Image: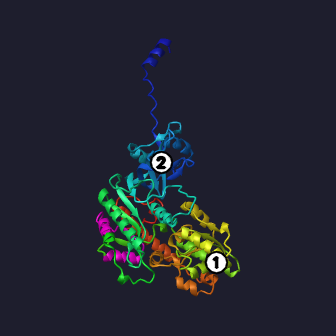
Amino acid sequence: EPPAARAAAESAAPEPAPPRPQERSFAWVPVDSSAECGGTVPRVACSWTLMASEIGSLPSRVDFKDALCKEFHPHGGVNPQAVNLCIQHRGQVGAVVRIGTSGEFAGLATLSDKAKVASFGSVTVGDIVPLKRVGLKSYYPDGFTCTDLKVNVGNYVWEYGARRLINPYTNLWLPCEDGNSCSVDTLVLSTANILVVDPRVDMGFQNLAKKEANKFTSLLQQTGVPAIMLGIGIQAEADMMLEEGALSNEASHFLRTLSSTVDVPNVGARGRLSSEMCRRAGVGHCVPSGCPSLFLNHTLDLGARMEQGWARIQERITKGERPKCGIGMPSKTFAGGSKLLRFFFDDLFKNFDCSVLLQTPTDLENVELMRKEWGIDIPEEKVRYFCNVEEWRHFLAKQDFFVGARIHGTMAATSVGLPSLAVPTDRRIEEMVQAMDLAWVTEADVLAAKSAKDLVMGVKFDGAAFDANRKKVACWYHRMFRGIDIRPHPELELFMESCE
């Protein structure tokens, strides 16, 4: 072909089409809600969260974590809402990120990417949950610790337990003491035994309980938002007859104000007695759910594991071994509780390798008095207390079993799957151990036992009943949270899959 003809043909041929731009791809990076990025980021929350029933082929890219952490605090600060878009699936949560054309990290995805994320990864998305501002009456900060035992540190257990019920990614916790100065979408309140129904209770405590009830009422009226209450209960002596009890006007007014904020039961009472006292006050929104610390551990078969643990402990005792025992002291003075203290610090120490877990300054005073008055050898290294709940739980996990006369110390042990025996010394503790199906004996049982060894060998714990009850309580929480439009903890949602 002549050169001229070939050149003409080439000039007439269509130009090749430009390369098509590569479709943007996505991945998700698992993130912790606290102490992320080597502890440099105390809190991670998500502006929007895709609730996925199926995550399809959306890849998990743990290798992007360092790049993601740079997005969290680009200027050395901390932004708790740094993740624009998250995805939650089967108890796990991660940040949705963009992947560049060369497979590199290309920044955080946004809500406008949700359809592309779903189509790219064959992700089945249900709800799309915005971040909620949740007000808390009390606040237990992440990583909290202390140097001196000045308060009842057991209170930190139920407060931390209340927080562990709630999804930390879709809910931003804000301390809310004054409703006029905090802007929140909802309130999650937690308190203890402010429902005083026994006139024999110390008058100072009665006045304190009334003051606390009035504070809660003012907070509800000032914010005007939906609210729930966790862990509220009665204060009464062990021998009080329920028929004789009555709530104060302040407590009744608070409960009625609280129940009016939503149309579903929204008061988590400590047990049947507290729930009954609510009903007598004209409030039908109380459910006996025990202590929020029941869900510090999100393991589905926790009861079955503890039942197996009791069998192992009893077998070891039969073989003559000395298992390690954690002791939770009774809330009694040295003079008023000498018989029970003798059991805890004489009999238990003789039979087992025990450590004492203190909760109040009175506990410390009792230890010193027992050393001085009774000559009981309680080594310093065997006396411990913790303000940080996770450190407390970590220590308990190294024990073999636990015997406790306070509810929160016993729940801290239960939360790590430790076979735990509760010894209630008043009605408030008794109603909680019954509401949560814990292993327990009465104070009279303890004093009548031949030895601590006989008492421990006689424990019969029904793990299946414990697990079934936890499932029931989880469904109560499910209805409460739905009533104020917040999500439960991602792992706790696994408990709630079959809830109506």
Residue 101 screen position, x and y as percent: 50, 36
Dot 1 corresponds to which residue? 373
Residue 155 screen position, x and y as percent: 48, 65
Give the residue type at disc 1: Glu
Residue 381: quadrant of the picture: bottom right
Secondary structure found at label 2: strand
Who comes first in sequence, dot 1 or dot 2? Answer: 2
Camera sees residue 224:
no
Which residue is at 34% across, 60% downward?
Answer: 484
Question: Where 279 falls versus 185 (above or below)?
Answer: below
Camera sees residue 165:
yes
Examine the structure image and report whether residue 271 is included in the region drawn in magenta: yes
Q: How dense is the environment of label 2, judged by Cα within 10 Å: few (below 14), some, or many (20 and up)?
A: many
Residue 185: quadrant of the picture: bottom left
The quadrant the C terminus occupies is bottom left
Which residue is at 42% across, 76% downward?
Answer: 201
Residue 261 screen position, x and y as percent: 30, 63
Question: Where 294 falls versus 182 (above or below)?
Answer: below
Disc 1 or disc 2, which is closer to the eye? Answer: 1
Which residue lies most toward the right here? 320
Q: How dense is the environment of label 1, judged by Cα within 10 Å: few (below 14), some, or many (20 and up)?
A: few
Q: Is residue 420 left or right of residue 95?
A: right
> What is the magenta range?
253-280
Which residue is at 55% across, 45% downward?
Answer: 65
Q: Is residue 284 left or right of residue 116?
A: left
Dot 2 corresponds to which residue? 95
Secondary structure found at label 1: helix
Residue 108 screen position, x and y as percent: 46, 42
Question: Where 446 falls versus 85 (above or below)?
Answer: below
Choose between 323 and 131: the one closer to the eye.
323
Q: Is residue 447 left or right of residue 263?
A: right
Which mark, residue 67?
A: none
